[in-house]
Amino acid sequence: MIELPEAYLEQMRELLGEELQDYLACFTRDNIRSLRLNTRKTAVHDFLRINPFALASIPWSDDGFYYEETDDPTRHPYYYAGLYYIQEASAMLPAQVLPIAKGDRVLDLCAAPGGKTLKIADKLQGSGVLFANDISISRAQVLLRNIENQGVKNCIVMAEEIDHLDRFIGYFDKILIDAPCSGEGMFRKDRKLIRSWLEKGNDHYVPIQKELLRKAVRFLKPGGCLVYSTCTFSRKENEEVIESALKEYPDLHVLPIRKTASFVSGLTDNTKDCVRLYPHKIKGEGHFVALLQKGETRSEAGAPVSHYENTFPCLEHFDLDLSQGRIVSRKDRFYLEPDTGIDLYGLRILRSGLYLGESSHDRFEPSYALAKAIGHKQYDNVLNLSLEDQRVLKYLKGETLDVRDRHANGMVLVCVDDFPLGFGIVSKGILKNKLPAQYRYQ
């Protein structure tokens, strides 16, 4: 049995009362495994027809599933095709309850590694603009890798401090804050967090959480919605942070979250519509989620849509939707940038929209990100392999392929069951692999 700090046990005894023993018993339970589908690439019902795993629905997620220990989705070609993302089940709730509409401007403020960002992107379905920020450059690079693997087109990836974002006051329709916290809800899964709790406790995070929420409310449009979430149980980091924001901003109020029978309400009158997730009550880890609104809902026309003609000659073989962005070039590199309507100069930006590729020796080299962001019908030279074809795994390992049975030459989009994996160059029946090393099968 894991040894928990006595001060923590006393805190949980106050929260749970007679349920404490049930909570402690969950520490002997096996880890729970779950994934969330990428609905920009495949509808849930379509994936379930080709699903190679034993899946069970997650009650609070419309596209999340538990999978069995005997399965390993990260070793399957569909993982490399970006059809799903491995995500803890409870962590799916914050982005699930954020009421995003097509065309919204959305901020994921503490975004890395990107699970919640990807759900937001699914809700936007390529419309509007998504800003994904993480103060750590190294974590933001992981975020960018996940965004590229999943084929997100309309995302601005930043690594900025919140004090540098004042230009966004009143800009966003929706905001998600998965705040840094003491991680009590993850003690069962990650024992290292217990050591961190002993070193920092709850008080270390409260000023950070209050500042993030305070600033984020200012970034919201009137009528906009915000989700504040943590993976901890502490009143100080949850209800008290919300109460502080409600006191500072009289036009801010809590919206109800639809509860399942296993969800627990917030602990105060003002936060009773928030939810607490405890690992002894659900098949998942610990979480706290609050849905807030600034003022009343306003009916506004969406952001203006710009229309650009696809006149970029290097993309003549592609059928790209340029209805909400424009192609820009920087030092022989080309990007499809979403229309933000705001000056981004001076911000620490890792990626502004979709990286299309670069011009090299008078030839356009399409990027891996472009391969993952398009469908197989959006490129005119496709090499489609069946899941059973041994060349799929060889391609994912970075090997050259014998494709003399196919009538394709030049730059080809390599797919498995019509889902893009990356590019390759075919000459005389041999495919030279263009899959970047960091995205290969390990």
Image: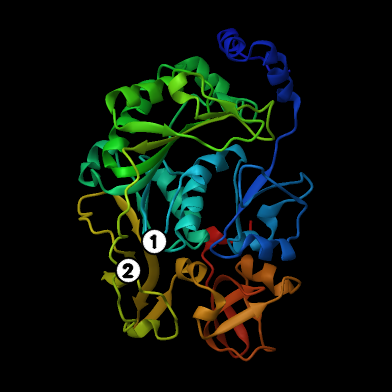
Marks 2 & 1, CB-CB < 8 Å contact = yes
The answer to which quarter of the image holds residue 214 is: top left
Numbered tag placed on residue 373 in the rendering = none
Left-right relation of 393 to 254: right
**Helix, strand or loop under label 2:** strand
**Helix, strand or loop under label 1:** loop
Residue at the image point whose x is 42% and y is 59% from the top: 102
Residue position for label 1: 154
The image shows residue 83 at horizontal and vertical percentages of 61, 61
Q: Amino acid at mark 2?
A: Gly
Label total for image = 2
Quick one: label 2, few (<14), some, or many (20+) residues within 10 Å?
many
Left-right relation of 87 to 319: right
The answer to which quarter of the image holds residue 252 is: top left
The image shows residue 106 at horizontal and vertical percentages of 37, 50
Report how far apart the C-alphas of labels 2 and 1 lie in the structure: 8 Å
Q: Nearer the viewer, residue 246 or 139?
A: 246
Residue at the image point whose x is 40% and y is 19% from the top: 204
Quick one: label 1, few (<14), some, or many (20+) residues within 10 Å?
many
Q: Quadrant of the C terminus?
A: bottom right
Numbered tag placed on residue 325 in the rendering = 2
